[in-house]
Amino acid sequence: MAKAKTNYTCNECGATATKWTGQCAACQQWNTMVETVIEAGGNNRYSQPAHLSLAQTAPVLSLADIDAIDVPRFGTGIEEFDRVLGGGLVAGGVVLIGGDPGIGKSTLLLQALANVSHLKKVLYVSGEESGAQIALRAKRLAIDARDLKLQAEIQLEKILATLADQKPEVAVIDSIQTLYSDALSSAPGSVAQVRECAAQLTRAAKQTGVTIILVGHVTKEGALAGPRVLEHIVDTVLYFEGDSHSSFRLVRAIKNRFGAVNELGVFAMTEKGLKGVSNPSALFLSQHDNQVPGSCVMVTQEGTRPLLVEIQALVDASHLPNARRLSVGLEQNRLAMLLAVLHRHAGIAAFDQDVFINAVGGVKISEPAVDLAVLLAINSSMRNKALPSGFVVFGEVGLAGEIRPAPRGQERLREAAKLGFSTAMIPTANAPKQPIEGMTIIGVDRIDDAFNKLREIQ
C-alpha cells in the first residue's frame, strides 16, 4: 500500500509547508510545525460506511423527547479507583491516566485489569515492557492473571487489528507516547504521532464499545506530554499526585464526562501493589502528643468526599531585604494576598517575616475554603501559641476582610465530628440549622471577628 503523503502544519496559525522549519514563516512562532497527513480526495481514513460511522445520520429531535438513560458501569475491584472514575468504567469510554515515572500507573492498571479479567475479556498492550517483565511484576504482586491477555506491540495498525480480532471489553495501552502509525514518518512520542494514535484508538472505542485506558507520560512541569488535544478527545483524565518517594499516592480526576471532576482516590503502595485507603483523613493529619503552634486543621472538599487536612505555618524573622513567601500544596499568589488581608483588616503585619506554608501529606488544595485555616496557622506561629485541641476550621477570606461560606458545609462538619473534633470555626452562613452532637459551632463574619473569638476560647 502506498504511503500517505504528509506536510507540516503550524499549531498556532494553521499555515502549511512541504518541509519542516524551526520557525513558521506566517506567524513567526518557533517550534510549532508538526507533521500531518495529506488526505487524497474521497480517501479520508475517518470516513466509513454508514453502518460503521461514529455518528449515524439522524433527524433533529427535541431534547425533551430524548430519554435520559444512565450510563451502565462496571467496577474494577479497587474501590478507590472506581470512586475516581465516577463509579466504574463505562463501555466505549476512553480514560487517560498520567503521572510521574515510577509512581504506580502500570501497577494500578495491572491490578485493575486482573480483577476485571475474571468477568470480562481484557487485553493489556505494552509498548514499554516485555511480556516477561510484566509477568514478573504480576508474580511479585501475587495477582491471578490467568485470564489476562497480553500483547507487546507499538505499531498502531497492528494494535487496531488485534482489537478487531480479539474483541476485548477492556484494553490498556501502556503508553500512548510509545505508539506510532505507518501513516506518519515522525518518531513515536511526537505531537503528530500522539494525536493520530489517540484519535484512531478513540474512534475504535466508540465504534466497538471497548473501554480503552491510555497511559500518558508527563513533562518536567507535570503536564501530560503531547498535544493538548489529547486531553480533549478522551472522556476521562486522571492524574497521579504525591511524592514517588512516599508510600502514599493520590489519583485525581481532572476531567470526567461520566462523573464528578476533582474526585480524589487515596492509595498506599505496599509490597502487594496499591491498596485503597478507607480513611484518608488520617494521612493528612500529623500525630502530635500536644498541640503545637502554627498548626491548624481544615476540612477540604475533594469531589464528593470531605477530607481533613492539616495546614502548617512557620513564621520567622527574615534576614533578607525581601522576606520569603513559600507555600507547598497551596497557591503561592493567594498566600501573598492573604498576608495583605491579615495586615489591613486584622492589624497583624508580616512584612519583615519569612512565611512558609505546607499542606501535610503532599495533598494539593486549590479551593479558597483553606483561607481561614492559613491565616489562623500564621497567627498561631507568630504568637507561638497553639490552637485549642479538637479545633477545625474552613472558610474563604475576601479582600474586604469578610469570611465567605464554603460549599457543602454540612458534610464537612459531619466528617469533622465523626473524627472527634469538638470545636469548629466556620462562616456564619455555613452554620447548621440543627446542632451537631458533640460539636460547638463558632460562626464568624470577618477576619478580625475570627481572631477575637479565638482569643476567647484559647
Image (spheres, rainbow, N blue to C red):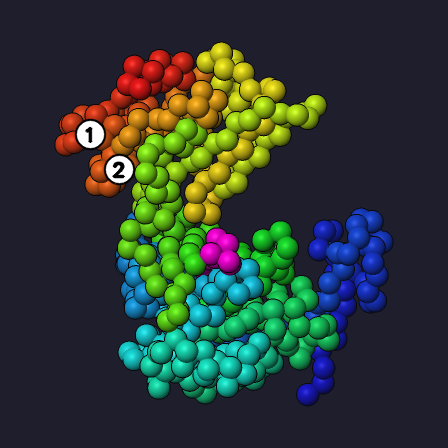
**With respect to residue 131, does 401 lie above or below?**
above
**Percent coordinates x, y for residue 396 in the rendering:** 41, 27
**Quarter location, residue 453:** top left
**With respect to residue 160, does 61 lie above or below?**
above
Helix, strand or loop at label 2? It is: helix
Is residue 247 in view?
Answer: yes
For image coordinates 58% across by 27% down, the residue present is 354
424 magenta-colored: no
From which residue to which does the magenta span run? 235-246
Amino acid at dot 2: Ala
Residue that carries the numbered disc 2 in the rendered image: 416
Q: Are marks 2 and 1 in contact (CB under 8 Å)?
A: yes
Mark 1 is surrounded, within 10 Å at the Cα level, by few (under 14), some (14 to 19) or many (20 or more) other residues, namely: some
Label 2 or label 1, whichever comes before in sequence order:
2
Mark 2 is surrounded, within 10 Å at the Cα level, by few (under 14), some (14 to 19) or many (20 or more) other residues, namely: many
Q: Nearer the viewer, residue 430 or 357?
A: 357
**Quarter location, residue 327:** top right
The quadrant the N terminus occupies is bottom right
**Percent coordinates x, y for residue 382 in the rendering:** 48, 22
The quadrant the C terminus occupies is top left
For image coordinates 68% across by 66% down, the residue present is 190
**Residue 439: numbered disc:** 1
Q: Nearer the viewer, residue 176 or 14?
A: 176
**With respect to residue 270, does 458 lie above or below?**
above
